[in-house]
Each structure stands twice: as structure tokens, then as C-alpha cells.
């Protein structure tokens, strides 16, 4: 193959792979992570007549009434895009979600490919960068679990930064872009706000560098005024209407991890280290390392990340790339360190820093192209190892969703229940119109079409709960509580105790793994 054809072969090959996987998940849709599952509950409320972005559910103070809550914790894109596909094509939630995944994966690939070429990298470096990115676990996760805003943000960011690099001057066109980019980015995911601000700082510096003070001020007006307007609009009409991650600051607390985790973000996110370890601090699966070992790993990665960025700033020739790396890394460190020190409800997860991990990839590949074969071989082995874990994840996860997960009216995979239990629940839903179903899983409510739903937080093995968060007062028609069989004992008693006005419980096995408690 001609060397000039290699970049095209890679990017079109990756695009074809996404389309093939998209067809597979259209035929057998994925499961849903908790965050977008909450969004789908809002979509369900809207389909049943609720207002825009409002979650309608039984009032915990009086179950005979409803309460309507504006869901400001998450942005609407994660459910509005699938909702748009549902309305446009007359399909249910599962296939609509599959179309969303396919579209935004393709947008992300092409957006970052064009961005990498725009900031000075050759087509082959840009294409190899996309190949390495596609090997990461975060890239294949949506084909198993729809992750909502994470996916939409990936599809948005490359095009957003491409526009930031491409604008020639500050003026009306730039102002319109800044305003619309703020709305579009927030529609995809609320955590885009720090990235949006960093992008505006980058744009301002890039257009004003080596210009007069007057030009700096003029550019600042054309960029800053619409950016402030977008943020103010988003805050007033969306974020301020309910709870959000900044609502519950627990006060200032000094900790080493609050400084080191953001500093280590390039390697944590760029090489899937946090993902493969199931979370070094915020654990999302089986514990891989102890807290002490995790702390040592993060400190080492922070030192190595700083060293890596200094190498990129020294050796990568394109000034736009060097500037974007400096602005985004410094912004991320300042924003997240402050958030962690204030103990905001923002988890210690590398996914929050994904943009840093994406941006360092072409710089690393450029550096490797100028080094000895042994270093390129080591990088190839690392990439291959990451790719193998990703292939294993997507193949195993897809097979489980297709062959074992239950499916109901939504079409989504429901791994939190089996088919026999879900069939029984759907049948009961069809037979009633004034019942309340209670789940300890966020995705199951989308299967309920005719009755109201309460979702309680799962109870941990330590059995520590705040009963005020669980207690449901009042009485309103039949009540059906669906629990996994593992809740038998203290956990189920805690749940039943949360409904003091209901008595005479009748327990029955929906299947070998799930039990239903009902009363009237």
C-alpha cells in the first residue's frame, strides 16, 4: 500500500468498524449506565405528559400526589438525542440509542482527525492517533453500556476545538460561534463548562498574541461577552433550577490526592489507566489496588505527566498545539483541584479529564516518530495490550447483552434483571393504571408504561442508610416492590419499612433471582 494511502485506510477503516458495531447494537441494543438512565426516566415522564426536563414521580411525603423535579444535575442531550430519533423514525428507545452511539462515535473520530491535522500533525500521525484512541476502553464502552454525556462530549469536542483553531479573527462571526458553542457543549454534557472556558481562553490568546493591548481588549470583548452570556443563560434557565454537582460543597479539606489526581490526568486518561484499574480512587468494580498503592501510583503518574507535557512543549513545533496543551492542562488542574479541595460532588475519575488524554496522543506519537525503534516498539506493545482489553470488554459485554440480559418494551438490555421477572413486571404494568412500582435500579423504570415509579438507592452491604432518604409516606393504590433475591434479610426489611402506611405484604418469586413484594 502506498504510504500516502495509509491515513485514509485507517480513518475509513475505523469509521467502517463503528458502523458495523452500530448495526450490531441496533439489532441488539446496549444497556445503560445510571446517569443516562436517569435521563431516560425524564424522557419517560415527558412522554407521559410531564414538562420539559422534569422528572415526575410519587411524592415521598404523600404517595397519593406527584412531585415534579427539574433534573438539573445532568444535561438533556443524553436523552434528547435518542428521543429525537424515536420521534423521527418511530422506533423505541433501544434502537434510538444505538443510532445516537453510532453518530457521535463517527463525529468524534472525524472531528479529532481534522483537529489533529489542523494543529500541525501530518495525516499519518493524526490517523495513528485516532487508531490509538479507538483502542481505549472508553471508546468501546458505549457499545456495551450507553454512557450518555461522555459519548456526546466526544462527538462534540473535536469540532469545537477545530473551530477554535480555525477562526481567523474576533468579530461577529466569532461571537456567534462562542455563544452557540456554549449552548451546544452544555447540551452534550454539563462538565463541558470548564473545557468551554479553557477553549475561550485559548481562542483569546491565539488571536491576540503579539498584538496591542487595544487588540487584546477588543478580542476579549468579542469572545468574553458572548461566553459570559451563554454561561449566564445556562445557569439561570437550567443549572439554578435544581441540584447540581456544586450544590453540596462539604467545606475545604486539604488532601494530597486533590492535587496529584488532576496533575496525573494526562496519563490516567490518555492510557486508560484509571479505567483498567476500575478506578484508582473512585472504584467502579472489583478493587484492583489498595488505597496506599493507588496513592503511590497517582503520585508517580503526576510526576511522569508533568515530565511528558514538558517534552511535548519543547519538541512539538506547532504553536497552536503547544498553547492548547498549556491552557487545557493548567485549566484542568486549577478547576479540579479547587473542586476536590472544596469536596464538591465530583468524583475522582479520569473520565472528567478525557480531553487532556485525547490531546496528548498526537504529541506522543510525533515524539515517538523521532525516537529509536525500541521506544516505538514499547508504545506499540502498550497500545496492543490496551486494545486487547478493549476487544475483550466489548465482545464479552455485547455477547452478554445479546444472550443473557432481559429486554422489555424499551428494547434496551436490562442486565439488572432476568427475562422471566421482567415479563411478569410488564404484564402487571399492563393490568394496572394506578399502581406504584419500586426499583433499586435506575434503568428498569423505562419499561413501565402505565403506572408510576419510585427508584430507591441500592443498599450497600454495610447496611448504612439514611431512612429520611428512603421513607415514603401515604398510601395510593397497589404497590409492587421488585428486589434481587440477594436483598433477602435485613435489606428487604429496610425497604418494606420505608412504606409505613402499607401492610400485609405478600412476597412471591418472579424468578430464581428476583422477588416481588406486593400489597394494596
Image (tube, rainbow, N blue to C red):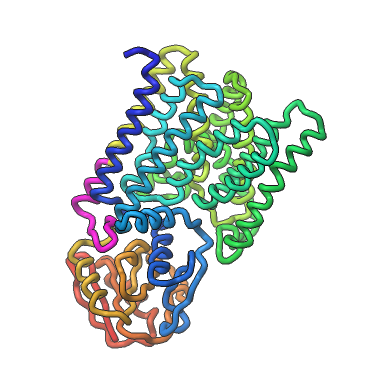
Q: Is residue 133 magenta?
A: no
| Residue 12 seen from this side | yes
| Residue 296 seen from this side | no
Question: Residue 276 at x, y = what percent?
Answer: 38, 40
Q: Give the range drawn in magenta.
A: 395-413
Question: Residue 186 at x, y = what percent?
Answer: 54, 51
Q: Residue at x 20, y 54 (%)?
A: 404
* Above or below for 244 versus 195: below
Question: Residue 247 at x, y = what percent?
Answer: 59, 62
Q: Which residue is drawn at 56% across and 45% down?
A: 257
Quadrant location of the N terminus? top left
Question: Residue 138 at x, y = what percent?
Answer: 40, 41
Asked if residue 340 lies left or right of residue 61, the reply is right
Quadrant location of the C terminus? bottom left
* Above or below for 24 versus 452: above
Decide which of 405, 234 is in the foreground and name it.
Answer: 234
Q: Which residue is drawn at 24% across and 62% down?
A: 408
Amino acid at each position: 500500500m502506498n504510504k500516502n494511502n495509509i491515513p485514509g485506510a485507517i480513518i475509513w477503516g475505523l469509521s467502517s468498524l463503528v458502523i458495523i458495531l452500530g448495526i450490531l447494537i441496533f439489532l441488539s441494543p446496549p444497556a445503560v449506565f445510571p446517569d443516562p438512565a436517569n435521563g431516560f426516566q425524564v424522557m419517560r415522564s415527558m412522554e407521559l405528559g410531564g414538562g420539559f426536563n422534569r422528572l415526575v414521580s410519587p411524592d415521598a411525603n404523600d404517595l397519593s400526589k406527584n412531585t415534579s423535579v427539574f433534573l438539573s444535575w445532568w444535561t438533556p442531550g443524553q436523552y434528547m438525542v435518542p428521543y429525537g430519533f424515536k420521534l423521527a423514525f418511530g422506533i423505541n428507545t433501544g434502537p434510538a440509542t444505538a443510532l445516537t452511539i453510532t453518530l457521535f462515535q463517527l463525529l468524534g473520530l472525524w472531528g479529532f482527525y481534522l483537529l489533529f491535522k489542523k494543529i500541525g500533525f501530518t495525516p499519518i500521525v493524526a490517523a495513528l492517533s485516532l487508531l490509538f484512541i479507538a483502542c481505549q476502553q472508553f471508546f468501546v464502552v458505549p457499545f456495551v453500556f450507553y454512557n450518555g454525556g461522555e459519548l456526546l462530549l466526544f462527538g462534540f469536542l473535536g469540532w469545537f476545538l477545530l473551530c477554535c483553531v480555525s477562526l481567523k479573527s474576533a468579530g461577529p462571526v466569532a461571537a456567534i460561534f462562542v455563544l452557540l458553542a456554549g449552548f451546544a457543549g452544555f447540551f452534550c454534557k454539563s462538565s463541558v463548562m470548564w473545557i468551554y472556558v479553557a477553549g475561550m481562553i485559548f481562542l483569546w490568546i491565539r488571536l491576540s498574541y503579539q498584538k496591542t493591548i487595544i487588540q487584546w481588549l477588543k478580542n476579549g470583548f468579542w469572545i468574553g461577552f458572548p461566553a459570559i452570556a451563554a454561561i449566564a443563560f445556562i445557569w439561570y434557565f437550567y443549572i439554578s433550577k435544581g441540584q447540581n454537582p456544586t450544590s453540596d460543597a462539604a467545606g475545604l479539606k486539604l488532601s494530597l490526592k486533590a492535587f496529584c489526581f488532576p496533575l496525573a490526568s494526562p496519563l490516567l486518561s490518555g492510557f486508560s489507566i484509571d479505567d483498567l484499574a476500575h478506578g484508582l480512587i473512585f472504584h467502579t468494580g472489583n478493587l484492583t489496588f489498595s488505597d496506599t498503592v493507588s496513592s503511590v501510583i497517582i503520585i508517580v503518574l503526576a510526576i511522569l505527566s508533568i515530565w511528558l507535557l514538558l517534552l511535548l512543549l519543547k519538541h512539538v513545533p506547532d504553536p497552536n498545539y503547544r498553547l492548547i496543551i498549556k491552557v487545557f492542562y493548567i485549566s484542568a488542574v486549577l478547576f479540579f483541584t479547587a473542586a476536590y479541595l472544596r469536596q464538591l460532588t465530583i468524583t475522582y475519575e479520569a473520565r472528567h479529564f478525557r480531553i487532556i488524554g485525547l490531546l496528548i496522543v498526537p504529541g506522543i506519537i510525533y515524539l515517538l516518530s523521532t525516537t529509536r525503534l525500541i521506544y516505538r516498539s514499547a508504545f506499540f506493545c502498550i497500545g496492543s495490550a490496551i486494545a486487547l482489553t478493549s476487544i475483550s470488554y466489548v465482545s464479552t459485554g455485547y455477547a452478554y447483552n445479546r444472550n443473557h440480559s432481559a429486554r422489555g418494551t424499551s428494547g434496551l438490555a436490562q442486565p439488572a434483571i432476568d427475562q422471566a421477572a421482567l415479563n411478569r413486571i410488564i404484564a402487571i404494568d399492563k393490568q394496572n393504571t394506578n399502581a406504584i412500582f419500586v426499583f433499586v435500579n435506575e434503568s428498569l423504570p423505562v419499561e413501565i408504561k402505565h403506572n408510576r415509579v419510585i427508584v430507591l438507592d441500592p443498599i450497600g452491604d454495610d447496611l448504612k442508610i439514611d431512612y429520611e432518604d428512603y421513607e415514603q409516606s401515604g398510601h395510593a393504590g397497589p404497590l409492587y416492590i421488585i428486589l434481587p433475591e440477594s436483598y433477602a434479610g435485613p435489606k428487604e426489611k429496610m425497604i418494606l419499612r420505608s412504606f409505613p402506611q402499607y401492610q400485609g405484604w405478600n412476597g412471591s418469586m418472579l424468578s430464581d433471582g428476583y422477588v416481588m413484594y406486593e400489597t394494596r
